[in-house]
Amino acid sequence: MPRSSGRKPQAKGFILWAFQEQTQSKLLEIGRRQRLGIFGIAGGFSALKSVNQRELPQYYPRLIGRIPPEELLQVPGPLPEAWPEIKARVLIPWLKEAVSSDTPPKDLAERLRAARLGRGRK
């Protein structure tokens, strides 16, 4: 939510609504009826442990006994502050090179390190 938003109470209300077990159960049912095939975070899991344990197996029986423990779920951290610059200067050129060249491009992690070092010298 943008810091300058004038609708913080409404956003807070939405978040409180969305993170209720009853709401997520209804969303699962709607998704099943509409055959959306998607739900939640981290590859389709709810942010609520109770929904993952009780509700998901009702809608997706093949998950019974196969839901990973919460410590195995990984959620990416926030993007770095310099993300727009990194994306424009490193990621997009790397992707373009990867799809248009016959040889694999230089390692992306190496390019990111080089860009970080170059930025620090300026």
Image (cartoon, rainbow, N blue to C red):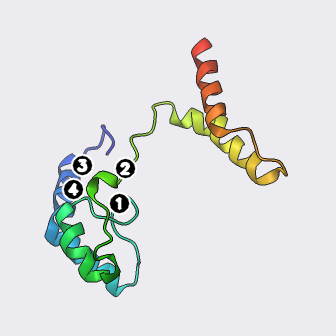
Q: Is residue 66 left or right of residue 104?
A: left
Q: Residues within 10 Å of mark 4 (few under 14, many from 20)?
A: few
| Residue 41, position as x, y percentages in the image | 35, 60
Q: Verify CB contact (< 8 Å) between mark 3 and mark 2.
A: no
User: In this orientation, does residue 122 appear?
Assistant: no
Quote the CA–CA distance across marks 2 and 1: 8 Å
Q: CA distance from mark 1 to mark 3?
A: 24 Å
Q: CA distance from mark 4 to mark 1?
A: 14 Å
Tag shown at residue 75: 2
Disc 4, SS: helix
Residue where numbered disc 4 is placed: 15
Q: Secondary structure at mark 2?
A: loop
Residue under pointer 1:
41
Q: Quarter of the image containing the N terminus?
A: top left
Give coordinates of residue 70: x percent, y percent: 27, 56
Looking at marks 4 and 3 on the same chain, the residue that comes earlier in the sequence is marked by 3
Compared across the picture, whether 87 is left or right of 13 comes to: right
Q: Mark 2: few, some, or many residues within 10 Å (few <14, many ≥20)? A: few
Observer-side mark, 2 or 4, equals 2
Of the residues shown, which amino acid type is indicated by label 4? Ile
Work out whether mark 3 precedes mark 2 in sequence or the reverse, and give the earlier one.
Answer: 3
Instruction: Name the spot of residue 24 as percent of width and height, x first.
Output: 22, 70
Quarter location, residue 87? top right
